[in-house]
Amino acid sequence: MGPNTLSLIGQKIPENAQFPPAIDTIEKGLSAIDVAYHMKHRGGEIGHYEYKAQGLGKAAMVCASPYPCDFDRGIITAMARRFAPKSESARVVHDDSKPCRRHGDESCTYTVTW
């Protein structure tokens, strides 16, 4: 399975999910990934999805999950696009300057801009 396929599968995860009305901004949407992840997974150390604000229109998502990098990128992309301001388009890029699970590290970092 290639990286684009994994990303597309990841994008389907939040596509039809119901979110509380209070989740109405990209910041809240990205922060909600970790909450939803822990609600759907039980037992053992399952990792996390950590939202870090980086200034106006920019954030980092640090993902330490057992899933492939491209799957996580898909989830983050779908959430960013779903909750980005209507006048903005969201972009998600793997931060190659940070550790990566593909190389045996514990997490990957994605830069989200809108």
Image (tube, grey):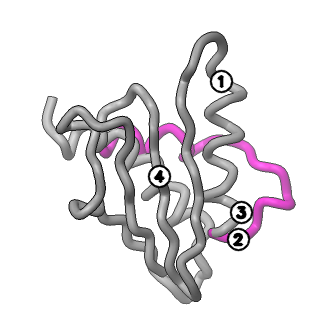
Above or below: residue 47 compared with residue 86: above
* Residue occupied by mark 2: 25
In the rendered structure, find residue 17 and report the number of the disc placed on it: none
Between circles 4 and 2, the one closer to the viewer is: 4
- Mark 4 and mark 2 lie on one chain; the one further toward the N terminus is 2
Point out the image quarter for the N terminus.
Answer: top left
Q: Quadrant of residue 42?
A: top right
**Dot 4 and dot 1 residues touching (CB under 8 Å):** no
**Dot 2 and dot 3 residues touching (CB under 8 Å):** yes
91 sits to left or right of 52: left
Q: Secondary structure at mark 2?
A: loop
Q: Secondary structure at mark 4?
A: strand
Separation of residues labelled 1 and 3 (CA atoms): 18 Å
| Residue 109 rendering spot, x and y as whole percentages | 38, 55
Q: Amino acid at mark 1?
A: Lys
Q: Amino acid at mark 4?
A: Val
- Mark 4 and mark 1 lie on one chain; the one further toward the N terminus is 1
Separation of residues labelled 2 and 1 (CA atoms): 22 Å
- Residue drawn at x 83%, y 51% as measured from the top left: 20
Q: Residues within 10 Å of mark 1 (few under 14, many from 20)?
A: few
Q: Which segment is the magenta one?
A: 6-26
45 sits to left or right of 93: right
Q: Is residue 19 magenta?
A: yes
Separation of residues labelled 4 and 1 (CA atoms): 19 Å
* Residue occupied by mark 4: 62
Q: Is residue 77 magenta?
A: no
- Mark 4 and mark 3 lie on one chain; the one further toward the N terminus is 3
Separation of residues labelled 4 and 2 (CA atoms): 19 Å
